[in-house]
Amino acid sequence: MCTAAIVQDMELDELDHAIIEHLRVDGRLSNVALADLVGLTPAPCLRRVQRLEAGGVIRGYQAVVSPDVLGRGFEVFLDIDLTDFARGSIAAFEAAMTEFDEVVELHRLFGTPDYCARVATADATTYEKFLTDQVLTIPGISRVSSRFAMKTLKSLWPESGAG
């Protein structure tokens, strides 16, 4: 059974949702601290977390690292339209784009544009070189439009660590 099916089949109660929310905000919470926050003792809390992990509800834990430290502080959103929609052409485009380290997200869309990519590089000069030497050399692209965020008002990732 695929993970999506497992997640759909799981029934989550208020405690599960509370656990998920606390771990979403701070994945480094100890089991004891988490149990205290949701009103459980540590053993049943740990069993619930393990069930959520096994069921694919909690897909993993990671450190959120400053993009500047990684040399990826300059982000651009690319809208990309293709000229050829043959299965092989789409597969080749997607394979090429997903191989680039600079592409941190790639979404195939309904409607226009055909794809939206989030690209992260060190600066505008590096981005221009990446766009010219990498993206625009992929066969079958009809149009690429670059958009730069003026300001991030809300993000999945906090600007600083929890605490």
Image (cartoon, rainbow, N blue to C red):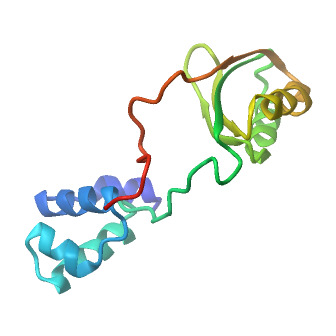
Residue beneath the point at 74% across and 34% down: 123
Count all numbered tags in the image, as a single digit.
0
Vertical placement of residue 147 versus 129, above or below: above
Vertical placement of residue 114 versus 23, above or below: above
Residue 19 position within the rendered picture, expressed as x and y whole percent measured from the top left: 22, 64
Image quadrant where residue 61 sits: bottom left
Vertical placement of residue 65 versus 61, above or below: above
Q: Nearer the viewer, residue 106 or 31?
A: 31
Residue beneath the point at 13% across and 74% down: 36
The extreme bottom residue here reads 43
Query: Which quadrant would the C terminus be assigned to in this image?
Result: bottom left
Residue 40 position within the rendered picture, expressed as x and y whole percent measured from the top left: 10, 76
Q: Nearer the viewer, residue 8 or 40?
A: 40
The extreme left residue here reads 39
Q: Is residue 38 left or right of residue 100?
A: left
Q: Is residue 51 visible?
A: yes
Residue 10 position within the rendered picture, expressed as x and y whole percent measured from the top left: 26, 60
Residue beneath the point at 76% across and 30% down: 90
Image quadrant where residue 5 sits: bottom left
Residue 56 position within the rendered picture, expressed as x and y whole percent measured from the top left: 40, 62
Q: Nearer the viewer, residue 35 or 84?
A: 35
Image quadrant where residue 50 sits: bottom left
Query: Which quadrant would the N terminus be assigned to in this image?
Result: bottom left
Residue beneath the point at 21% across and 76% down: 33
Q: Is residue 118 visible?
A: no
